[in-house]
Image (cartoon, helix red, strand yellow):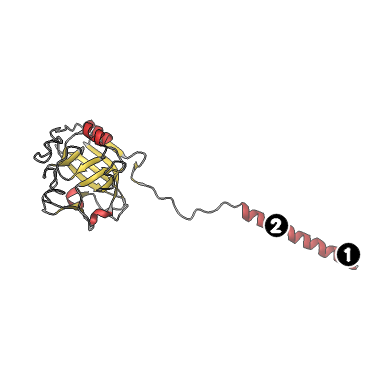
Amino acid sequence: MKKIKALFLLSMLSMSMLMIVGCSKTEAEKPAETTETEKVEGVGDLTKENPIQVNKEEGTVTFLAQVNGKYFYEPTRHAAVFADGSNGEKAVFRGFVNHEDLYNGLIEIGAKAGENMTLDNKETTNVQGDAFDVSVNWTGAEKAVTIDEAIKDSNGTPIDIRFGGNLKTAMDKKTGCLICLDSCPVGITSNASYTYGSVEKTKTVEFMGNKDILPEDGTYVAVTMKLKK
């Protein structure tokens, strides 16, 4: 009888061990749960891989950029610069489209470049070319804001962005300048309200990102350039 009881207890112990091993294996084989959704680096359909959209019907070119909060507190002469250009960290908006693609996009919507700026006349000449309404939008924004709302001009002068052109010089210099805040012989577009040097040389004006309007540093934004009729 004792022998039968001992065999019964041994059998029950073996079954318990098998159940424990089985449960441990099941738990180990369960895939780890994802606790955080991967952040999407973009706005709408704009991503770093596809950073520009051209809409010929609407007459718009929209490109992906990122807020550089440094220029909430320091002046700059650059509104947007291609991130891989030599001036990539000198703008209110770090752009992810290069200067050649922006130029081609503006040509595609029918914009005409002024091509009147040179390295020799830059300090005495205001950029010419077709004009644009420039706006900035981002995920969660109530509405798009104008460039005059996004960037503060210390004189309160409206920003007048023109299609300067300058593709050859831009390709040679590789600064990456997309939208400059004074007339520029290198930037694809720039501000006709001031001649080159007004920010850094004569200090006629200061431009800074508007921290009361724009989202925080590092936020991805969509910059839209709409051809004025």
Q: Report crowding for label 1: few under 14, some 14 to 19, many 20 or more residues within 10 A (C-alpha).
A: few
What's the distance in space between the residues labelled 2 and 1, CA to CA?
26 Å
Residue matched to label 2: 21
Q: Earlier in the sequence, mark 2 or mark 1?
A: 1
Tell me: residue 50, above or below residue 22. Answer: above
Residue beneath disc 1:
4
Q: Is residue 94 left or right of residue 207?
A: right
Report the amino acid beneath label 2.
Val
Residue found at the far bottom of this picture: 2
Between 77 and 57, which is closer to the camera in this rendering?
77
- Looking at the rendered image, the quarter that the N terminus falls into is bottom right
Residue 105 in view, yes or no: no
Determine whether the residue tagged by mark 1 lies in a helix, strand or loop.
helix
Q: Which of marks 2 and 1 is in front?
A: 2
Q: In percent of the image, x 88 and y 64: which residue is there?
A: 4
Camera-side residue of 170 and 192: 170
Task: Find residue 198 and report its horizontal and vertical position in percent.
Answer: 12, 47
Q: In this view, does 135 lie to the left or right of 120?
A: right
Q: Position of residue 70 (x, y in %)?
A: 27, 54
Task: State whether residue 34 appears in this view.
Answer: yes
Under circle 2, the secondary element is helix
What is the x, y in percent for residue 21?
70, 57
Compared across the picture, whether 26 is left or right of 223 comes to right
Residue type at numbered disc 1: Ile
199 vs 111, nearest the viewer:
199
Taking 224 as reference, is 165 above or below it? above
